[in-house]
Amino acid sequence: MARKLKRDLTVEEQLARGPLDLPFLMLVLMLTAIGVIMMFSASYADALYNMGDPTYYFLRQGVFAVAGVAIMLALSKVNYQTLRWFAVIALWGSILLLILVKVPGIGASGGGANRWIRAIGPLPRWQPSEAAKLGVILYFSARLSKRNTEKKRKFNRRTYTGRFLEWLDGIGFLELVPYIAALGIILFLLFLQPHLSAMILILAIAASILFAAGIKLRWFGLGALMMAAGMWIISQSGSYMADRIAIWQDPWSDIQGEGYQIIQSLYAIGSGGLLGLGIGNSRQKFLYLPELQNDYVFPIVCEELGFIGASMILLLFALLIIRGYWLALHARDRFGALLIVGITTQVAVQVFLNVGVVTNLLPPTGISLPFFSYGGTALVIQLVEMGIVLSVSRQIPAPRAG
């Protein structure tokens, strides 16, 4: 009888094979399935008119959804500790992609912005800002998770420079220099596109991870003041931003021009009423509302599912976010906790920005709705992030009986 000698599993391998968090997994699968269905309904008329095939967007998004779920489940079985060494590569790789957006023949523009990489073969064009979000999450989490184990810096107190550096270290500024440098490079590249919503989103992700890592609160106050000043400067720096803010304040000032999209979005939301018109029965999707399969899919959700249906979807997002933060609180180590905080904050802020824009609560920013908006590479990256959360959840210590 043939004998097989089984290698004893290490402690790390045993932890990585623990049960994943089923509530979080089910919420992700539900949002992904509902998102693909609603994107299909929203894009039906546009795909038929412009592509000659009503299932054009649906089939492509469906393929990416299936592939993304498969990658998510595979990644959930990988020990997330292996992501530590990949963090710096992810950060600099995303910076390189942001630079490539400005390279002629590689970058693509649209709607007054230059924030895409051109389609390559069967792959559609996509935004490198999606990769930048993940790069920031990995880099900040990996570096800050070792914050309490780093050796204390020593300076020569006999020199003015040494005493000045010691003072900066004492107030916690030197600790922030690597993060300020990384953010500065990424935000500058996003400013050149311009991509204001991605800038806000990456700042929120970075701030959430820094806060969870225990950075002193006074730096967040200073950062908020600098962010407010930066947003004001950006809003005054050119006609692109100024026009968007003017339309946000009064979209009816240019009904057939810049204000057309948000007005049609509000019509769609208002037409849904309490119970909605039913799936597939939207009127605004018949070439009235532009970009409805992308950033403006949620108004069609409101029109077809009504206030109750749209509220249920927002409730699913809320439950996903709450569960994410719960997993962060119970993570095995600081690295896992910071990873989940960054990913969960990204989803939370992205949902808020998208819904805020389509309801005219916020100025137009060009941010997509997670799991719902058309974009295969964006959906895959979102599901990769969900796989990281599930990987961390496998190593959460089981509660003790009694």
Image (tube, rainbow, N blue to C red):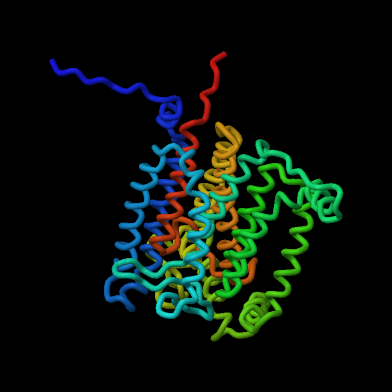
Depth check: give the residue in front, 232 or 274.
232
At x 54%, y 69%, the residue is 366
Residue 149, above or below 127: above
Depth check: give the residue in front, 91 or 367.
91
Q: Is residue 374 visible?
A: yes
Depth check: give the residue in front, 172 or 62.
172
Q: Position of residue 49 (x, y in %)?
A: 32, 78
Q: Quadrant of the C terminus?
A: top right
Residue 223, above or below 208: below
Task: Give the image quarter of residue 281.
Answer: bottom left
Q: Position of residue 399 (x, y in %)?
A: 54, 22
Q: Quadrant of the N terminus?
A: top left
At x 75%, y 64%, the residue is 226
Q: How many marks?
A: 0
Q: Position of residue 146 (x, y in %)?
A: 62, 40
Left or right of 235 in this view: 222: right
Q: Is residue 272 visible?
A: no
At x 53%, y 71%, the residue is 265
Residue 47, above or below 151: below
